[in-house]
Amino acid sequence: MTISALLSQLLQLAIALALAPLLVGWVNQCRAWLQNKSAPSLLLPYRTIRKLFMKDAVVASSASPIFRLAPYVVFGAMCCAAAIVPSLATDLPFARAADAIALVGLFALARVFISLAAMDIGTSFGTMGARREMFVGFLAEPALLMVLFTASLISGSTSLPTIVDTLAHRELAIYPSLALAGVAFTMVSLAENARIPVDNPATHLELTMIHEAMILEYSARHLALIEWASALKLFNYSCIGLAIFLPFGIAAGSDNWLAILGAAPALIGKLILGGFALALIETLSAKMRIFRAPEFLGTAFLLAVLAMLVNQLLGS
Amino acid sequence: MPLSLLQLVIAAIAAWLAIGALGLVRPRHLPFISRALFPAGAAVGLALAVVAFLGIGPLPQATVLPIGLPDLPFHLRLDSLSAFFLLLLGAAGSAISLFSVGYFRSSEGTAPGVICFQYHAFLASMALVLVADDAYAFMVAWESMALASYFLVTTEHRIPEIRHAGFLYLLIAHVGAIGILLCFGVLQGGSGDYTFGSMRSMILTGAWPSAAFFLALFGFGAKAGLVPMHIWLPEAHPAAPSPVSALMSGIMLKTAIYGLLRVTFDLLNGQLWWWGVVALSLGLVTALFGVIFAAVQTDMKRLLAYSSIENIGIIVAGIGLTILFKAYGKTLLAAITLTAVLYHTLNHAFFKSLLFLATGSVLHATKERSLGKLGGLIHRMPWVAWLALVGTLAIAGLPPLNGFVSEWLLLQAFLFTPSLPQSFVNMLVPVAAAALVLAVALAAYVMVKFYGVIFLGQPREPNLAYAKDAGLFERCALVWLALGCVLLGLFPVNVIAMLDPINTMLIGSTAGHAITDNWLLLAPISADRSSYSPLIVLVVIAAMVLLTIQVVHRFYHGRVRTADPWDCGFPLQTPRMQDSAEGFGQPIRQVFEPFFRIERHLPSPFDAAPVYSLKADDHWWYWLYLPIARSADFVARLVGRIQQGRISVYLTYSFFTLLTLLFFVR
């Protein structure tokens, strides 16, 4: 482990932390444009987080320490995940400590904690949100793992930097398995990031909300951390998708700072396009009933399994 | 002369039996039994764990005890595999004994001294199963284990349901024992020598090895709870006192795993690949079945029983994969898979015992087993709640705790399978991996339900406000088990190094670089392929959490106000408006509806007192067990026809029997 590798690791983490709210702002802006509304400021998520940090936290009297601990754990897990996912360069010392399976484990850790916190107050909304979140998660998590497995079978490794290295620096070939996995991954990302058609980030309508129902009791700095963590989650998912399915432009090592500097505009460009695509999907589709969600996620799961099967059939 | 390790193990077994016998001296004297005998049993368990730890690795030791049948004395043997399971027994058993110090009280049921005897006989017979080296000693120990646990299950024998559950358990245990007995019969191969030593050297031909394997799978599967022989678990575990549930689920199920490993990899010479496919499929079906049923349970111990079925399924699936690899000569991969199997076995002993004991504390504090009447106990019972949280996160397979390590290893093994020569098997593997991860993800759902409904939220019943936290001994036991979960999770490389002699013994290969390269980094095959370091993950998460707390509090402020929860403008909310256990499981029930046999009673709009009820039952009762029970009844009735109860009729039967026999003998 060299100093430059450590620096590039810290740089990527800092970029993820800094850019994540911007990505959310950008998606919101695109969605407003597509829906013919006047858009909020691009920097609104930053202002919201700052405003929330300033406020006094209000905690329900029936809350236990788990409720106050959960936002920090969720935020910590998402930072950890951001340190594993290669966004600029693939030389990540920390990625040796946690591979793709551990990444899914980290997401699960965050999900379990936020669900427990939602059940902690003991309101009907909190438990409903926790139930729905775990319900979405139990299908989305295996589907995500299957997508990552498809990529690991192609590259013969579960370490994310190695996967991205292999996929980025191969000769140009079309992998049918990756196409199926890509569709599955898109569907999983929509569900996991509480997006339409599974959830709606902009609603507080009791019949439909999932994520918002869970965090209804949170305020001030706890809420700020949760908002930031969900922005980080969206950023992480975008980076996983970009790294596996569009890995071009990522710097191979950490010694070549020029390559890393070159990777930054590529990343930003890809994120701009990805954010727009997300807004487009959200605008074009309608929110589905909660009991249609298993069909949606089941499809994603089967597509991912199919991707692995295709990979086995055709060979990598 | 210093005692050998095997002699120490025998001494531990004898000590347990002696402690049990002491309990019978003054069966109603509770302080003597709970303050002297159970702690002594725990100390013996701890000593056994130390001895067993030393016993993993050295050459096997064997001895012959001068008890048993005239020309078939007890053969005992301690090798790495036995030593590992003895370690599990000692480590988890000592915690459970410690917990029992504060748990057993005088009650309507069995006297405490008798419980003490049954309890220690149970421990001793499990230890004897693990060191037995001939079929006779094994079966004697196996049956004593079944009997002792049967009596423990029926401690509250005045309650009819509990007697019923105990009977069901005894029945399945004996059906399984017949399978094991037949398996040993096949294994001795006509030589008439029932020692394991001669079975090892016996070369079976034709269909006999397969017959032996499937008899073992059936027999040990009945004990372990493989579908469709799982039905006794959800009945017996809620019936038993909590420490007994913990012993049965955490340790006794593992003796069945031990038996399966012993027969498959030690006594049988060579394995066939399709056994692996069968075991893998059966294990995955069991895992999915168990976890789906666990999701809809409303009794906390039934929920844990179904979760045990799930974990046994995962373990058996791993054994299937090991057979598959070994049959194709991929010894390194087989070693990694077997490591995952043993690791998960050890993990399950720790977290499942922890959770069962925690339910025991809850049960004592609240007198309530139904999830729908609990809630909010983290405020009243913080020790139990926080320690149970460790077990919950571990069993849900979350990093950096121990459940994740074994699942990680198993998934790695799945990812290596494409190198197998048979394309059919290669196609099976993605489907199997998908089923496994689905089961693991569902386990997280189940555990959130378990923990959230019991410990979080608001108390659903007013009397929960008087719940008291666990006593000192119970806390110590829970801390010990939770510590085990954490340490097994944080230092996987050391644990795998400890397990490696078993790989060498059963597979003939070590688990490779995972143990040699770097104590911090778990990397089977090579670090390029995959690596995982729970300690670093924990340090980074903890550092991030502390840093965030520091930064937030320094640059902003740490002010907190408390207020009532937001009532959404509807002030009449009560704690009963939280999700009940049924409510939390309802989505899973709806998605997997074909798995359940659902009896629903819907109220009509004109009912004066509307009643809604729903019962989600197990299909296997109606598909398999009730038909068998009905046909047994039918046969019994037919036989009953010839029983007239008059002596002249019976004399006539004897006369005709004699005539028939004479006809043949002539």
Image: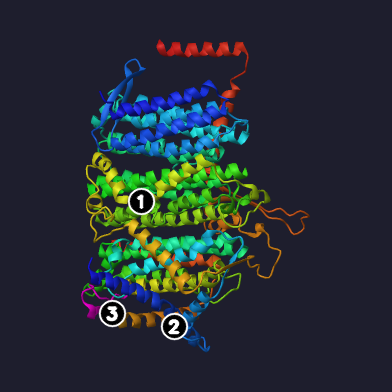
Q: Is residue B207 left or right of residue B123?
A: left
* Residue annotated with mark 2: A26
Residue ranking furthest to the front: B554
User: In the depicted view, which residue is nearer to us: B133 or B634?
Assistant: B133
Residue at position x 55%, y 52% in the image: B296
Q: Are marks 1 and 2 in contact (CB under 8 Å)?
A: no
The chain ID associated with circle 3 is A
Residue at position x 26%, y 82% in the image: A262
Label 3 to label 2, Cα distance in Å? 20 Å
Badge 2 crowding class, 10 Å Cα cut-off, few under 14, some 14 to 19, many 20 or more, is many
Residue B208 place in picture, x, y as percent: 30, 34
Badge 1 crowding class, 10 Å Cα cut-off, few under 14, some 14 to 19, many 20 or more, is many
Q: Amino acid at mark 3?
A: Ala
Residue B406 numbered mark, or none: 1
Q: Amino acid at mark 2?
A: Trp
Q: Do badges 1 and 3 share one subunit?
A: no
Tell me which colouring the rendered structure shows: rainbow
**Residue B313 in view (yes/no):** no
Residue B365 place in picture, x, y as percent: 60, 44
Residue A139 numbered mark, or none: none
Judging from the image, what secondary structure is the residue with disc 2 in?
helix
**B72 over B314 or under it: above or below:** above
Residue at position x 38%, y 39% in the image: B88
Judging from the image, what secondary structure is the residue with disc 1 in?
helix
Q: Is residue B304 left or right of residue A240?
A: right
The magenta segment is A245-263
Residue A15 place in picture, x, y as percent: 35, 76
The chain ID associated with circle 1 is B
**Residue B422 in view (yes/no):** yes
* Residue annotated with mark 3: A263
User: In the depicted view, which residue is nearer to us: B449 or B205?
Assistant: B449
Q: Quadrant of the N terminus of chain B?
A: top left
